[in-house]
Image (cartoon, coloured by chain):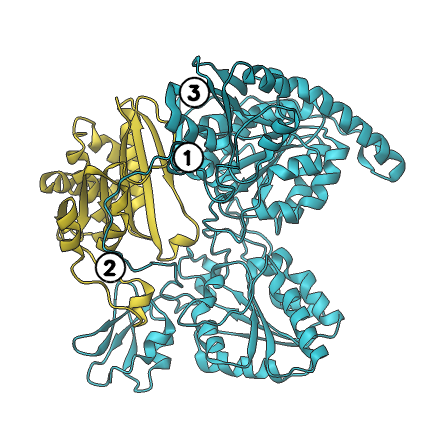
């Protein structure tokens, strides 16, 4: 049966066909839909983990326990999960295990562009790299066979274009595989130094055998077009190369990319006048091919940053400039993402942005947008959870310098707090910091498209789950000063910030209001009966056109430049009332829908 | 056949992804090789969005290069202007005459540019449609995307495909009729 699937859907389908029984992930663009699709198969126990390290450890455990397991994450997630990955590689597997890393050449929704093919080399695990959805499905199935045959977890590199592009996939049925018995084997599963030395030797031997596999697997194939130009390519870069060169070049497509098929590469390179290496981001294959004494052209001409799209290949190698019809550049306004109308983060950032006495350390989530106008609130961001620990460090530096002109506020969301904010908050308390932490609890993991988390009351399968209470967690970390508020109430928000900045020691504000795009659960409906049931209108008699309401940055507002009055788009507005509280003339009314 | 390229652009929440899904499903069922690419993530929050659809005998790249689109369907006029460089020299554009303000306009930093449609029409072969108004007249502004889809189907010569059946299989039952009406309204207006 043929289906049009994204790469992420194809991975889910492939895992199901391969008899996978356990899958886990923390959401992150572009990987999120893998687990969302896995969860649609009844045969696979599927879970959202609080972070990627937990997910990878749980997948490793399920594999040791005897069932095929999958875990997936975005590229930076593998940094979080790197610790278990390296040692899991040494232990090896019982049932097969595959770790999917979704890299982001072009950084559409990420803070960096790291190339996780480096992790395969660093952690000593083998790697597959599909170039479209059919390959994603076929390779994931093969990856389980390789994992079990060569006794190691397999790293599976996707990129945004492969994750989010749809192409046609021939689907098959699920093939059940026998569960593996679990037997106690401390030499295999306990990496004490005495045993770990043996594990390293075993890993090296398995790698030797994988070199043979790499030279013979059909996923590394030659397409001979009798050309003097030879192209070695992996991932979607191979598709881009074919788009540009068609049958004017011969190809060596590498789908199993670590260890590289060096014998096949040497054979392919014979009788070729020029060899090009097409790979996105780092010159990894290129360096290994050059180190083997095979001349090739790669990153000296091709870009190391961003996607290696056909137009960039044409420009770099063929000096082809495409003629295009250009619009008048003065008419082009950028359209960056913005907080939605009714977003519960608006009140917090409106109040924070008005103050000049704060150093605001933000985090990874929709609230990253708090750095943009009109709020201009945020000072710094690093990675998941760094708002609290990074903020702690900044405050320590201010204290050491005796500089009291600014006080540190750390700000992050509920899912990010569960991910890695808790240990950071312990650090704040334990090391006697005096930062103010604001946890924006919007009852969901928002930015990645509404995934459940330990605080929401539901699991990945949509079933009811115990709620981890953020307030109780904060108290358990030793925080004495804590309040919970409605972020849409600006006076309350402002008072809370003022309070938090003036208490002795660390303080925490939890704002609690659901994401406007969330499908409200019955729990939400009970707790927030008025949520999104209103809309605002402007009384044009009272409006003086001062534009203060526009400082809320709400996309439901529209200023009438002819009549010099504010207006509100009824279809977009959900009646949070933030603009009404800002208006100095009380010209905005909240009405029930 | 040579691979054909269709670009759909709009603002997050306008239904470009759904339109692209219907389009690619129909193309696959008609026997074409199909690839579609889109970028989601942060752009969902009111940012610019695009779906790239390619079909033919054997499609390699999922992305459409600048200067190579056979047709661009713009769900919003500023997005139409922004995407112009993707068009082939003799390509066509369908523009919905709707205006959605970027945040810089909302907060009063910039004014929404005037004369966008005139600028587009002066440079390329462009059809302006009032798809949002047509959708409201049909009774649901959410079918704007299917009206625009109908116009692309007509302009790309794809009317032989059984689109009514594709819609019936892929939208909720109570919305099938209005979507089929929208499809034909779009085809007729193109």
Closer mark to the observer between disc 3 and disc 2: 3
The single residue placed furthest to the left in the displayed view is B188
Residue B167 drawn above or below residue A435: above
The answer to whether tags 2 and 1 share a subunit is yes
Q: Chain of mark 1?
A: A
Label 2, on which residue?
A331
Is residue A318 visible in this depiction of the protein? yes
Kindly identify the residue that appears in the image at 60 percent across and 65 percent down. A387
**Horizontal placement of A51 versus A173: left or right?**
right
Mark 3 burial class by Cα count in 10 Å: few <14, some 14-19, many 20+: many
Label 3, on which residue?
A249
**Horizontal placement of A96 versus A583: left or right?**
right
In the rendered structure, the colour chosen for chain B is: yellow
Asked where in the image residue B7 lies, by quadrant, the reply is: top left
Between residue A286 and residue A264, name the one nearer to us.
A286
In the rendered structure, the colour chosen for chain A is: cyan
Query: What is the secondary structure assignment of the residue under circle 3?
Result: loop
Q: Which mark is residue A313?
A: 1
Q: Chain of mark 3?
A: A
Between discs 1 and 3, the one toward the N terminus: 3
Between discs 3 and 2, the one toward the N terminus: 3
């Amino acid at each position: 049966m043929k289906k049009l699937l994204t790469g992420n859907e194809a991975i889910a389908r492939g895992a199901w066909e391969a008899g996978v029984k356990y899958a886990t992930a923390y959401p992150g663009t572009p990987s999120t839909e893998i687990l969302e699709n896995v969860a649609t198969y009844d045969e696979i126990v599927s879970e959202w983990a609080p972070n990627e390290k937990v997910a990878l450890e749980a997948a490793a455990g399920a594999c040791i326990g005897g069932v095929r397991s999958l875990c997936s994450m975005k590229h930076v997630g593998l940094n979080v999960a790197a610790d278990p990955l390296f040692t899991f590689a040494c232990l090896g597997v019982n049932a097969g295990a595959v770790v999917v890393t979704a890299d982001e050449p072009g950084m559409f929704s990420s803070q960096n562009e790291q190339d996780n093919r480096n992790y395969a080399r660093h952690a000593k695990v083998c790697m597959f790299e599909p170039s479209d959805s059919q390959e994603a499905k076929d390779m994931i199935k093969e990856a389980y066979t390789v994992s079990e045959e060569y006794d190691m977890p397999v790293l599976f590199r996707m990129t945004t274009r492969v994750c989010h592009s749809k192409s046609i996939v021939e689907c098959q049925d699920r093939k059940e595989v026998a569960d593996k018995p679990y037997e106690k084997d401390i030499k295999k599963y306990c990496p004490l130094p005495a045993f770990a030395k043996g594990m390293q030797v075993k890993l090296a031997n398995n790698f030797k055998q994988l070199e043979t596999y790499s030279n013979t697997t059909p996923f590394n194939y030659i397409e001979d077009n009798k050309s003097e130009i030879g192209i070695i390519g992996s991932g979607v870069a191979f598709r881009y190369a074919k788009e540009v060169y068609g049958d004017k070049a011969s190809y060596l497509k590498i789908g199993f990319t670590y260890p590289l098929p060096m014998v096949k590469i040497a054979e392919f390179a014979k009788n070729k006048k020029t060899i090009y290496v097409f790979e996105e981001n780092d010159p990894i294959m290129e360096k290994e091919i050059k180190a083997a004494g095979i001349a090739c052209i790669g990153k000296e001409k091709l870009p190391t940053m961003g996607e290696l799209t056909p137009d960039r290949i044409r420009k770099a190698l063929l000096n082809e400039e495409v003629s295009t019809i250009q619009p008048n550049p003065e008419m082009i306004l950028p359209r960056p993402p913005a907080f939605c109308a009714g977003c519960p983060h608006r009140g917090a950032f409106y109040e924070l942005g008005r103050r000049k006495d704060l150093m605001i350390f933000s985090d990874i989530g929709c609230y990253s947008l708090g750095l943009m106008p009109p709020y201009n609130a945020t000072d710094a961001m690093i990675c998941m959870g760094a708002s609290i620990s990074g903020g702690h460090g900044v405050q320590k530096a201010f204290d050491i310098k005796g500089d009291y002109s600014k006080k540190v506020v750390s700000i992050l969301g509920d899912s990010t707090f569960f991910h890695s904010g808790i240990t950071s908050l312990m650090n704040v308390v334990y090391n006697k910091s005096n930062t103010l932490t604001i946890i924006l609890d919007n009852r969901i993991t928002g930015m990645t498209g509404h995934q459940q988390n330990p605080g929401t009351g539901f699991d990945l399968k949509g079933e009811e789950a115990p709620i981890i209470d953020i307030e109780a967690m904060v108290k358990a970390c030793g925080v004495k000063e804590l309040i919970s508020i409605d972020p849409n109430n600006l006076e309350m928000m402002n008072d809370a910030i003022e309070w938090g900045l003036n208490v002795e020691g660390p303080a925490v504000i939890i704002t609690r209001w659901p994401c406007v795009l969330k499908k409200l659960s019955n729990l939400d409906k009970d707790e927030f009966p008025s949520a999104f049931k209103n809309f605002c209108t402007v009384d044009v008699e009272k409006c003086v056109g001062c534009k203060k309401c526009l400082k809320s940055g709400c996309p439901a507002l529209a200023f009438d430049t002819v009549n010099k009055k504010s207006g509100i788009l009824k279809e977009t507005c959900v009646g949070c009332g933030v603009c009404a509280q800002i208006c100095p003339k009380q010209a905005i009314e909240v009405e029930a829908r | 056949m040579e691979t054909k390229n269709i670009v759909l652009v709009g603002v997050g929440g306008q239904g470009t992804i759904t339109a692209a899904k219907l389009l690619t499903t129909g193309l696959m069922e008609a026997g074409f090789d199909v690839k579609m690419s889109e970028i989601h993530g942060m752009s969902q929050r009111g940012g610019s969005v695009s779906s790239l659809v390619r079909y033919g005998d054997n499609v390699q790249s999922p992305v459409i290069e600048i200067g190579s689109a056979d047709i661009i369907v713009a769900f919003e006029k500023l997005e139409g202007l922004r995407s112009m460089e993707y068009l082939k020299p003799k390509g066509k554009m369908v523009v919905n005459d709707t205006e959605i303000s970027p945040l810089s306009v909302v907060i009063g930093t910039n004014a929404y540019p005037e004369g966008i449609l005139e600028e587009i029409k002066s440079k390329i072969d462009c059809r302006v449609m009032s798809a949002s108004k047509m959708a409201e007249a049909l009774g649901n502004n959410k079918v704007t995307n299917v009206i625009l889809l109908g116009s692309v189907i007509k302009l790309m010569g794809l009317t032989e495909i059984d689109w009514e059946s594709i819609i019936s299989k892929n939208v909720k039952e109570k919305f099938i009729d209005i979507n089929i009406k929208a499809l034909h309204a779009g085809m007729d207006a193109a």
